[in-house]
Amino acid sequence: MPDMTPTPQQPAATVDAVIVGAGFAGMYLLHRLRALGMTTRVFEQAAGVGGTWYWNRYPGARCDVESMQYSYGFSDAIQQEWQWSERFSAQPEILAYANWVADRLDLRRDITFGTAVTAADWDEAAHRWMVRTDGGDVVAARHLIMATGCLSTAKLPEIPGIESFRGATYHTGYWPHEGVDFAGRAVAVIGTGSSAIQAIPVIAEQAKHLTVFQRTPNFSIPSRNMPMDAEYEGLWKSDYPARRAVARTMRTGILYGLNDVSALEVSEAERLAEYERRWEAGGTAFMAAFNDLITSPEANHTAAEFVRNKIRGIVKDPKVAEILAPKDHPIGTKRICVDTAYYETYNRPNVTLVDVRRNAIAAITEAGVRLADGTEHAVDDIVFATGFDAMTGALTRVAIRGAAGQTLAEKWEAGPRTYLGLGTAGFPNMFMITGPGSPSVLSNMIVSIEQHVDWVVDCLVHLRDRGLTRIEATGEAEDGWVAHNNEVADRTLYPRAASWYMGANVPGKPRVFMPYIGGVGTYRQLCDEVAQKGYEGFRLERAEARAAAE
């Protein structure tokens, strides 16, 4: 019997689009493309839908955008039928929502689960991608759409001796699906970013003793989470289209009250009253207290000092409070966290805070964590809350080879370069959903996802209707967008922080401000203008035109 193993010349299937990832972006893409009659294959490494909410099951995992807004807006039936149980939904409920949508739209039949895309090579003659997976699939696709998410590649720590530890180790981004019981255990948490700030209070309630190793303190605002109020839910559902429309014009894609006044134009009493009101209301809307908190160092200082004083008032030990009070970056320039009793946790007798900025972690030993001064903290379990290779990690780990034979990882060696965060020069017919250079992580991700998906789908229809087979961002357009992205970022305080927005949490990663800070509304308008001008900044071709030219 002849060998029927697919080869690059003999793909197992040919489709209009391959989508990589079945999180909220991949699911919506599949739904839109299927409705247009476009053949689509989705590959998802996980065993189910949900993207980051499939993997991030650590204790206390919760969204920092209110449930009524962190949800799909493309279908009125879906947004009316689903009922959220809390103001800020926890991971299990968000994952249940993703699964419900997948079932409601019958998406699973076009998704191959448990399969990672490992490589994709551009075939210039055919104007298509040859996509390969770790399951042996070889698929020819006119378009390759990377819906891999911004926070989907966990960053493992580079600490000597991890393999020697005799206890159990966990990463917040790869949490065991069966959960972990820390009762009676001595636990170490390394890191105090967003996931740690959510997990630490829950672990502290379970563990015999919890030792937190902090290098960089982060600002956190109480969530004031509560069961969903029926009246509040009803207000949103009675006016969803109008509320969604306004949210799409706002800088973050989140509908909340913006105070269009400088923090320096009001009296100290008025300023403190506004901060207090925002603190009591809870959530990230704190940063909308005044209009210059991310642009004016003086204004930002007033907000930062307010939160530092809150920490000093909550944490009983003054020395611990000062270690927890951030002083090395403006508030909001690292992802501001939202918590439930985070600072209060350090008043518990079973919690110890270790400042590893003053006394660094030297090694992981068989029994625990050893510091530079020789002190060793014996623990039974270690939780690494060390974040992600954000924005680019999920893209560059796939061997994507473009028109000139260069891989995406090689092209981005000095930092990511895109046009609108949607395409990158040298990689025709490849789109990124919420890629670097788009608002992405500085926004309500689902709002940004829907905007990107709608733009890409409209673009594919434009190409199909005109018999066009190739679209590629030009180098000039890409250069212009990178320059604009940097210029806008430099008008703010964001580059002053060594954040994962800058890639600072990954040793050796170039320091480039990756998301677009110009705002969701402004960005949407720019993207729409590009499309209205016949996809200005992109080069569009037919396969036969390229062949004739050669």
Image: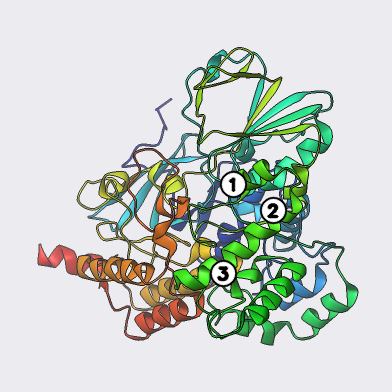
Residue 440, compared with residue 520, is above or below; it is above
Q: CA distance from mark 3 to mark 1?
A: 22 Å
Q: Which residue is mark 1?
A: 193
Q: Which residue is mark 3?
A: 302
Q: Earlier in the sequence, mark 3 or mark 1?
A: 1
Q: Earlier in the sequence, mark 1 or mark 2?
A: 1
Q: Residues within 10 Å of mark 1 (few under 14, many from 20)?
A: many
Q: In the orientation shown, which residue stands out farthest toward the right?
A: 230
Which element carries disc 2, helix, strand or loop?
helix
Say which amino acid is labelled 3: Thr
* Left or right of 401 on screen, residue 176: right
Q: Are marks 3 and 1 in contact (CB under 8 Å)?
A: no
Residue 273 visible somewhere in the drawing:
yes
Q: What is the number of callouts on the image?
A: 3
Q: Residues within 10 Å of mark 3 (few under 14, many from 20)?
A: some
Quarter the C terminus occupies: bottom left
Residue 107, compared with residue 261, is above or below; it is above
Q: CA distance from mark 1 to mark 2?
A: 19 Å
Q: Which residue is mark 2?
A: 312
The image shows residue 512 at horizontal and vertical percentages of 34, 55
Say which amino acid is labelled 1: Gly
Say which amino acid is labelled 2: Arg
